[in-house]
Image (cartoon, helix red, strand yellow):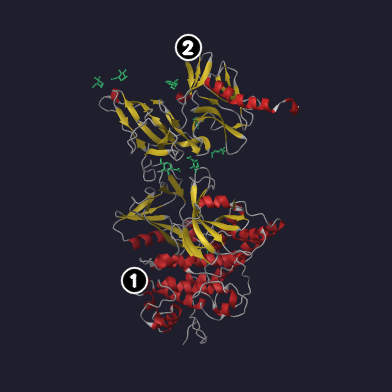
């Protein structure tokens, strides 16, 4: 058969094809014409190819949306859709019928959607160059997409009184969303949310004010968008009320559209018509200006779900984040509700005799403006914190110039913004050092957490019980991990599916050609980068380019990476992906905005005592997890302030763990092979003994002293020789009963003397030269939290300059 067609003949057909397509696109669509939903179905085009109506393939490649989009704009921007709530399966068909206009049916001929009009015989239909799809009879238009808008208003399209735009569910999910833009019968244009179950309309969060009380015939009667980008409410007396007073002057050189986004922000955006260099949509104006600080009604949630915190991105669209200690109720609903990872409330609290169940997380410029049940005024910050801690109903205390507001669950309209002057103190349970759910086994982990909390609640709080609990926790996790490991052994090279693979080119793109250096370590250089999380979102990453990986085979490298990938803890930096292309091996971590502990601790502004102690406890938790809960156990080997990062909430996150194997240092070291950093390394590194988790305990001790004192371990510029080596000086101070001297004149620390002594003693235990004297990290954690008494550290090893000498 193939030989029948001469190559030239095929070329001729190829040449002809576009012509045919162009011709049919210019013409009208006659009844019985149809499009079938397949991967490469051709849409119906407008005469100048500005717009197309056809099938848009959804994320699930077997589902299709009947939609209209800009045909010439590379990034598909959908302006209208028919079947948002009912995606059409593959091989569905949209047909122009003589009696019903557009009809969308599934492969079995069942109706999915049709254009609704009263009566009339269809003569033809047109995809107009304005973006309007029109079904005509011989004499008039029977149905227009412009009269049945979805979430977008195009130039020359109008919304009459009673008309509305309705948001989609998410950027790539076209189901009906929670938000509406309506022109009310009284002439006001409003934005409101609805309850999706009942269709109940909540009170508007934006009102145009175009209802004229004196003369109602002058009220608004249409919302319009003109070709030049003017977006306004037209009043009865032909006056306009502009909705688009933005920075950009109206211009005919742009495409404009007004879209009600799934997050409730109405955006007027423009796209240059001429082929310039930067061709993308840019925001002209958003309504409301700042949705995070907009006051919603008294009911329903705002743009973010309950217990969530809203922050405004540069494009004036919101980002929703769960506060520390909380996570999304539904991991797929980024804008949904958050729930606490721990149990709280009067019933739960009453089970525990301890007064000290919670710590407060301080959130600057953060408010939950409603849901308060008590206000105390006047009130000091410290009293405010104490009142909330003592009150089992209190979930968060918000402190501002008007006093102290105690709030209970659920917490709607959370916001963090520089305009907000309130500070929130959020109660988070201390004994919950269980962690974020690993994506692979959500159920198990969830049960495990609640199991631990349940046990914690049921038992008393004696030291013995606490050890027992930690034991159970560590063993439980051990078994879980054993299971996981054995599963992994079946196919060692499979890396968790949540981990992304990047090729070298992608890494080059992400880091802009390895341009911005964040730091250098023993492994190589760290670069700042940006990756796409999906088609709409990007996230900052830190790319570690490993310059001396020893593993020969991809398989070994991947096994090591998968060990790191299995760690999930809120005090560890998360690994997002890796690159492994010939010689290029890189690890891609989440980017943490607040830098390293080193710069925080030794910078110009001294962090508060409270913040410092929280950070120390966080690091201890992270290490405890690496030592006790990971299988195989992970020894960090290089704990120092440069390797501790701080997240948005200044919570400590350990980085660079799990790298020692990748870098070819095994567990029996000799002098030539010292990993770690001078000043932080344990004395046994200089001997030929097997290295154990206790090297991390030592380094942690040094780090803890640095955190307490806000200075580096070795500082030659302090003036007094006795103070140059912090570990020595701390011993001296402790022996002389003068730990106060260590914190200089830090009033907050001095007023918290018991904790100060506890922390110093714990640190002195950690830096014992005799390995067997050094406590495990879990014991250190219990010491820091004040759950067990810290005995006075021993002073029996006069041979070292690191341990205390008498
Ligand atoms: C079709 O588009 C033209 C301009 O291209 C416009 O003048 C006309 O009003 C549009 N018709 C409809 C029904 O939208
Ligand atoms: C879109 O979201 C709705 C509501 O959560 C859900 O029921 C539906 O399955 C989603 N559709 C797609 C295609 O993911
Ligand atoms: C809500 O409105 C939609 C149409 O927008 C309708 O299909 C649905 O049945 C309504 N739900 C209720 C509970 O009235
Ligand atoms: C209301 O305004 C219209 C047009 O501006 C005017 O013709 C009419 O007389 C006014 N009616 C009253 C009651 O003021
Ligand atoms: C408003 O303008 C339209 C067209 O420009 C005109 O037909 C109408 O009479 C005007 N209405 C008033 C109240 O001025
Ligand atoms: C979009 O275009 C604007 C200029 O119109 C430019 O500043 C911006 O960087 C561009 N954004 C992207 C993502 O290309
Ligand atoms: C297209 O979308 C992607 C992802 O959203 C974005 O990175 C890219 O800059 C966009 N391209 C243009 C030309 O706007
Ligand atoms: C009581 O609370 C403390 C935290 O202060 C916790 O360590 C302990 O495990 C709890 N006791 C029980 C029995 O839950």
- Viewer-nearest residue: 588 or 618: 588
What label does residue 139 carry, if any?
2
Image quadrant where one finds the N terminus: top right
Of marks 2 and 1, which one's residue comes earlier in the chain?
2
- Residue at the image position 59 percent from the left and 80 percent from the top: 687
Q: Is residue 366 above or below residue 472?
A: above
Q: Which secondary structure, mark 1?
A: helix
Residue 683 occupies quadrant: bottom right
Is the residue marked by circle 1 packed among few (<14), some (14-19), or many (20+) residues within 10 Å?
few
Q: Whole-percent x and y of residue 650?
A: 43, 60
Q: What is the residue that sits farthest to the front in this orientation?
A: 8
Residue 154 occupies quadrant: top left
Does residue 524 appear in the picture of this structure? yes
- Residue at the image position 56 percent from the left and 81 percent from the top: 770
What label does residue 747 carry, if any?
1
What label does residue 585 carry, if any?
none
- Residue at the image position 70 percent from the left and 55 percent from the top: 491
Q: Is residue 535 left or right of residue 496?
A: left
Instruction: State which image quarter holds ligand 4.
Output: top left
- How many angstroms separate mark 2 from mark 1 (CA)? 86 Å
Q: Which secondary structure, mark 2?
A: loop
């Amino acid at each position: 058969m193939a030989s029948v067609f001469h190559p030239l003949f095929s070329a001729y057909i190829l040449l002809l094809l576009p012509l045919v397509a162009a011709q049919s696109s210019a013409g009208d669509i006659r009844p019985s014409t149809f499009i079938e939903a397949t991967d490469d179905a051709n849409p119906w085009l407008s005469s100048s190819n500005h717009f197309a109506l056809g099938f848009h393939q959804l994320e699930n490649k077997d589902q299709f949306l009947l939609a209209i989009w800009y045909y010439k704009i590379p990034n598909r921007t959908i302006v209208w859709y028919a079947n948002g709530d009912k995606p059409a399966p593959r091989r569905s068909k949209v047909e122009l019928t003589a009696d019903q206009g557009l009809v969308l049916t599934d492969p079995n001929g069942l109706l999915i959607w049709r254009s609704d009009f009263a009566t009339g015989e269809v003569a033809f239909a047109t995809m107009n160059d304005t973006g309007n799809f029109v079904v005509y009879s011989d004499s008039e238009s029977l149905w227009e997409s412009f009269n049945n808008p979805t979430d977008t208003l195009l130039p020359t399209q109008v919304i009459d009184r009673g008309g509305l735009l309705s948001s989609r569910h998410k950027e790539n999910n076209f189901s009906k969303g929670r938000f509406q833009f309506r022109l009310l019968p009284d002439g006001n244009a409003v934005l409101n949310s609805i309850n999706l179950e009942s269709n109940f309309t909540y009170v508007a969060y934006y009102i145009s004010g175009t209802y004229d009380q004196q003369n109602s015939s002058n009220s608004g009667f249409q919302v319009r968008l003109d070709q030049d980008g003017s977006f306004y409410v037209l009043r009865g007396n032909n006056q306009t009320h502009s909705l688009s007073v933005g920075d950009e002057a109206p211009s005919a050189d742009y495409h404009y559209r007004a879209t009600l986004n799934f997050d409730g922000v109405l955006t007027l955006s423009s796209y240059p018509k001429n082929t310039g260099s930067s061709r993308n949509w840019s925001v002209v104006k958003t309504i409301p200006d700042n949705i995070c600080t907009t006051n919603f009604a008294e009911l329903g949630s705002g743009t973010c779900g309950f217990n969530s915190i809203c922050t405004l991105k540069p494009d004036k669209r919101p980002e929703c984040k769960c506060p520390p200690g909380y996570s999304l109720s539904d991991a797929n609903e980024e804008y949904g509700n958050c729930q606490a990872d721990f149990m709280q409330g009067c019933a739960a609290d009453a089970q525990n005799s301890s007064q000290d169940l919670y710590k407060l997380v301080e959130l600057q410029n953060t408010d939950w403006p409603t849901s308060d049940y008590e206000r105390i005024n006047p009130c000091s910050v410290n009293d405010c914190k104490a009142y909330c801690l003592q009150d089992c109903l209190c979930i968060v205390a918000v402190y501002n110039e008007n006093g102290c507001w105690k709030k209970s669950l659920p917490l709607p309209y959370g916001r963090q913004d520089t305009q907000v002057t309130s500070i929130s103190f959020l109660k988070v349970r201390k004994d919950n050092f269980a962690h974020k759910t690993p994506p692979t086994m959500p159920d198990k982990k969830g049960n495990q957490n609640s199991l631990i909390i349940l046990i914690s609640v049921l038992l008393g709080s004696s030291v013995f019980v606490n050890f027992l609990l930690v034991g159970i926790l560590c063993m439980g996790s051990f078994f879980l991990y054993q299971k996981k490991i054995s599963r992994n052994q079946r196919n060692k090279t499979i890396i968790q599916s949540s981990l992304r693979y990047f090729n070298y080119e992608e890494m080059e793109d992400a880091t802009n050609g390895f341009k911005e250096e964040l730091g250098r370590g023993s492994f190589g250089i760290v670069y700042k980068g940006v990756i796409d999380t999906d088609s709409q979102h990007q996230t900052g990453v830190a790319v570690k380019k490993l310059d001396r990986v020893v593993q020969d085979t991809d398989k070994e490298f991947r096994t090591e990476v998968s060990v790191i990938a299995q760690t999930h803890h809120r005090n560890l930096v998360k690994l997002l992906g890796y690159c492994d292309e010939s010689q290029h091996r890189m690890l891609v971590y989440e980017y943490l905005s607040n830098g390293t502990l080193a710069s925080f601790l030794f910078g110009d502004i001294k962090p508060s005592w409270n913040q410092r102690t929280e950070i120390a406890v966080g690091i201890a938790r992270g290490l405890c997890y690496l030592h006790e809960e990971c299988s195989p156990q992970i020894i960090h080997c290089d704990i120092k302030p440069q390797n501790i990062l701080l997240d948005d909430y200044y919570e400590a996150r350990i980085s660079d763990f799990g790298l020692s194997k990748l870098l070819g240092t095994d567990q029996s070291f000799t002098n030539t092979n010292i990993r770690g950093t001078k000043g932080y390394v344990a004395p046994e590194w200089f001997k030929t003994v097997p290295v154990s988790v206790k090297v991390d305990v030592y380094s942690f001790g040094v780090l803890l002293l640095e955190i307490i004192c806000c200075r580096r371990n070795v500082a030659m510029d302090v003036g007094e020789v006795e103070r140059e080596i912090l570990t020595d000086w701390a011993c001296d101070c402790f022996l002389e009963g003068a730990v106060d001297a260590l914190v200089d004149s830090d009033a907050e620390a001095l007023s918290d003397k018991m904790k100060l002594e506890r922390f110093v003693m714990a640190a002195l235990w950690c830096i014992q030269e005799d390995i067997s004297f050094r406590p495990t990290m879990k014991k250190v954690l219990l010491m820091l939290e004040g759950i067990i008494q810290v005995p006075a550290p021993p002073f029996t090893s006069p041979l070292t300059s690191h341990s205390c000498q008498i």
